[in-house]
Amino acid sequence: MRIYISADMEGITGLVDADDVQPAGRDYERGRLMMAEDVNAAVRGALAAGATDIVVNDAHGPMRNLLPEALHPAVRLIRGKPKQMGMLEGLTPGHHAMIGVGYHSRAGVLGVLSHSFMGHEIEDMWLDGRPVGEIGLAHATAAAIGVPLVALTGDDTACDEATAWDDSVTTVAVKYARDRFAARLRPADEAREAIEKAVTTALAAHAVRAEPTPPSEPQAPRELTVRWQSASVAATLQGIPGVTATDSRTVRAEGRLPSLYRLFGVWMRVAASLTNQPPYC
């Protein structure tokens, strides 16, 4: 059984502030070890469910947060950037299930370190007219690839967002948002035990098939719309074929996932080249 883990950082046990999750932050080194422990808990849960191959993609910021030596020896780690598929780099139809560790809620939600991909540079996003963030877009893209998202960990708002997209996803709240940079924390040992048990249970309940298969029918085109803080970003993106504007700061495009997800990654690289803003403001 081949399992894919996408590991973000804002939704990790104990972390609540930019100083916890950014390389220049005073508590970043502690934060990356906390991240490794949450990932290791998910790995132990997957192994208990019968996983024979586990790929972990470091999906946060610089994507060099996880220390290889701090991870369970069963892990095959994808580290660094750029990655054509970003937070989903390495996910293929050959995986039986996906697990999201350390995820956070979308921009505009009062969740711990909430945002959508680029701090406050992205003000809002919609997939087929429905508000979406990293969780919803990952879920939809994984489904298009043919891999179900079966479990997700983060704060309570991230868990609520995941179940709103798909109530079959098993979630583990490792903290409870009090504001964007404050939370009531679960004790670390308790949170990791909950992650491990939830992953084992989710994989068993999902009745993961012996051999993964891609979707039997082509996916219908989807529409992705992004509202940027900067009109300059929206204007520049209109130079990409297929990208149109709905107003001075909002662009949209249609396409099939996962190609549309990859295109969005190009949009973010363009935006990053035009702006120089801290992620959490």
Image (spheres, helix red, strand yellow):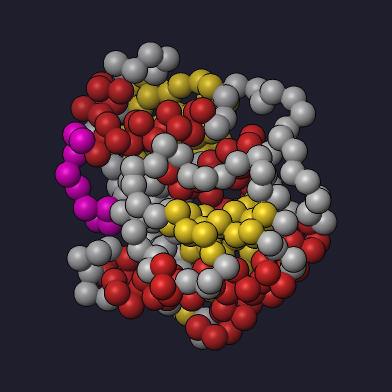
Residue 55 in view = yes
State left or right for residue 53 relative to residue 252: right
Q: Quadrant of residue 247?
A: top left
* Residue reaching furthest to the top: 241
User: Percent from the top left, x then y, of residue 153?
Assistant: 56, 65
Is 107 or 147 nearer to us in this picture?
Answer: 147
Question: Is the residue 228 above or below the residue 171 in the image?
Answer: above
Q: Quadrant of residue 257?
A: top right
Residue 170 in view = no
Chief secondary structure of the magenta span? loop
Q: Residue at x 38, y 68 (%)?
A: 67
User: Percent from the top left, x then y, of residue 157?
Assistant: 53, 61
State left or right for residue 166 relative to residue 153: right
State left or right for residue 214 relative to residue 119: right
Q: Is residue 278 magenta?
A: yes
Q: Residue at x 66, y 40 (%)?
A: 93
User: Percent from the top left, x then y, of residue 163?
Assistant: 65, 54
Q: Quadrant of the N terminus?
A: bottom right
Is 223 or 6 nearer to us in this picture?
Answer: 6
Question: Is the residue 201 above or below the residue 55 in the image?
Answer: below
The residue segment tinted magenta is 273-281
Is 48 or 191 nearer to us in this picture?
Answer: 48
User: Percent from the top left, x then y, of residue 148?
Assistant: 68, 47
Q: Is residue 85 magenta?
A: no
